[in-house]
Each structure stands twice: as C-alpha cells, then as structure tokens.
Amino acid sequence: LLQVMVDHGFFAKCSKCSFGQQSIEYLGHIVSGTGVAMDQSKVDFILHWPHPSNLKELRGFLGLTGYYRRFISHYVHIARPLTDLLKRDTFSWNSQAQQAFINWQ
C-alpha cells in the first residue's frame, strides 16, 4: 500500500500512521476488519444531549445524528417529528418532538 501511495505522489506522515492495529478511529467511526461502526464516544454524546431549546440546537442535534443515519434503523421515521419543527416559523417543542427525542435514547 505504501508503494502505491508513493507511485501516485502521496506520502504518509509516520506520526499519523498506525500499523498492526485491530481497529482505528477515523472521522467518528471505528474501522476494523469486521466493518465500520459508530465511535462509542459519539454514541454517548448523542445519548446525553439535552433536548434542544431552539432551532440552532435542533439543527446541531439533527446534523450529528444525520451523520450516523446509516447506523440508525428507521432514522427518517424517528427524526420526522424533529425535522418537522424546522419547517415552522417558530420553534415550539411539543410532545411528538419529545417522544422522538426520547426514541434516540
């Protein structure tokens, strides 16, 4: 692999390389021989996120969870009550949004 990189004009910085590892953390994911998974610290971060109190916080939460949507079964259905709040003129946290938020946890 290193020779292929050199052949194409790429170089690896030794301080940023890991050799002989079973898994590595990369862009918020754990990559291993068995596949790709969410980094547990990101899972914990999502689970302990306080419920949003304004549109900016809601966008932040949906942005983070959306990044991991491939790991969340039925993401669209779970997120729909929250994404519907983005379509309104005013932010109004309701029982459907609260239930959707609880479903993440």
Image (tube, rainbow, N blue to C red):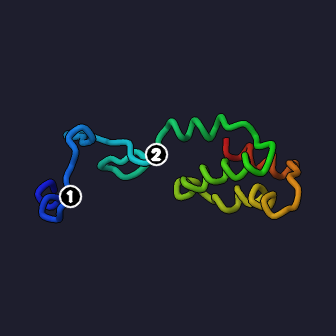
Q: Residue 49, located in which quarter of the rendered image?
A: top right
**Residue 92 position within the rendered picture, expressed as x and y whole percent measured from the top left:** 88, 51
Secondary structure beneath dot 1 equals loop
Asked whether, in this view, residue 46 is left or right of residue 80, the answer is left
Amino acid residing under circle 1: Phe
Q: Residue at x 70, y 61 (%)?
A: 77
Q: Is residue 18 positioned above or below 66 on the image?
A: above
Q: Position of residue 54 (x, y in %)?
A: 80, 46
Q: Looking at the picture, does residue 105 appear above or below residue 1?
A: above
Image-based side of 34 in relation to 70, left or right: left
Badge 2: few (under 14), some or many (20 or more) residues near its Cα, within 10 Å? Answer: some
| Kind of element beneath mark 2 | loop
Quick one: label 1, few (<14), some, or many (20+) residues within 10 Å?
Answer: few
Disc 2 marks which residue?
A: 28
Q: Residue at x 87, y 61 (%)?
A: 89
Mark seen at residue 10? 1
Residue 48: give x, y in percent of width and height.
65, 34
Task: Report how far apart the C-alphas of labels 1 and 2 lie in the structure.
Answer: 24 Å
Residue drawn 78% across the image and 59% down it: 86
Quarter of the image for the C terminus: give it.
Answer: top right
Give whichever of discs 1 and 2 has the lower sequence position.
Answer: 1
